[in-house]
Image: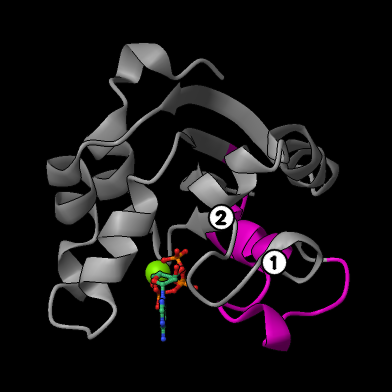
Amino acid sequence: MATQRTFSIIKPDATRRNLTGAINAKIEAAGLRIVGQKRIHMSKAQAEAFYAVHAERPFYNDLVSFMISGPVVVQVLEGENAVAAYRQVMGATNPADADAGTIRKEFAESIEANSVHGSNSDENAVIEIGHFFTEEEIVG
Ligand code: ATP
Ligand code: MG
């Protein structure tokens, strides 16, 4: 069985409400291992680069402003089918559509302030991890 990595961000709405530990508890309960983690305040340039794929979307500028409105916790998660496993724990983008027990159902404030980010493919996980971590900072 393949162990994979995914990239996670605990977003400013969640750090502001002291939910880092509660979110990490859900991550770990799902069998994912937090193998890299740091609390940072993203620069505007970092947030713009990270969300470049959404540059044409109407919510892009607001999303960048939100992501730099406070500290975030960037993480590397490891586990079996990590990308899909984490997206299941996160729940749907819009908390109104998220399943019971998911991070977004329990904690998200809105479709934008939805508490967490998780990669949507193995390829993007590698790219996104590379935005914030060196290999030396990831300890399995
Ligand atoms: P993420 O990429 O953060 O894991 P996702 O893959 O579920 O979430 P995307 O479609 O990639 O969602 O959108 C990225 C982020 O942009 C969302 O998590 C959310 O914060 C914000 N976003 C998405 N759709 C909207 C919208 N309609 N209005 C405002 N913000 C939005
Ligand atoms: Mg996405």
Q: Residues within 10 Å of mark 2 (few under 14, many from 20)?
A: many
What's the residue type where badge 2 is placed?
Val
x 18%, y 70%: residue: 53
Q: Does 38 sit left or right of 47 as displayed?
A: right
Quadrant where the C terminus sits is top right
x 87%, y 75%: residue: 100
Q: Is residue 140 visible?
A: yes
Q: Does 20 sit left or right of 112 as displayed?
A: right
x 12%, y 44%: residue: 45
Which quarter of the picture shows residue 58? bottom left
How is the model colour-coded? one colour
**x and y percentages locating residue 43 in the rendered image:** 21, 36
Asked whether 105 falls inside the magenta stretch, the response is no
- Is the residue marked 1 within 8 Å of ligand 1, measured from its CB? no
Q: Does 22 sit left or right of 61 as displayed?
A: right
The secondary structure type at the circle numbered 2 is strand
x 69%, y 43%: residue: 17
Q: Does 53 sit left or right of 71 as displayed?
A: left
The disc, 1 or 2, on the residue closer to the chain's N-terminal end is: 1
Asked whether 94 falls inside the magenta stretch, the response is yes
Q: Which residue is mark 1?
A: 104
**Mark sitting on residue 116:** 2
Q: Which residues are magenta?
A: 78-101
**x and y percentages locating residue 136 in the rendered image:** 34, 11
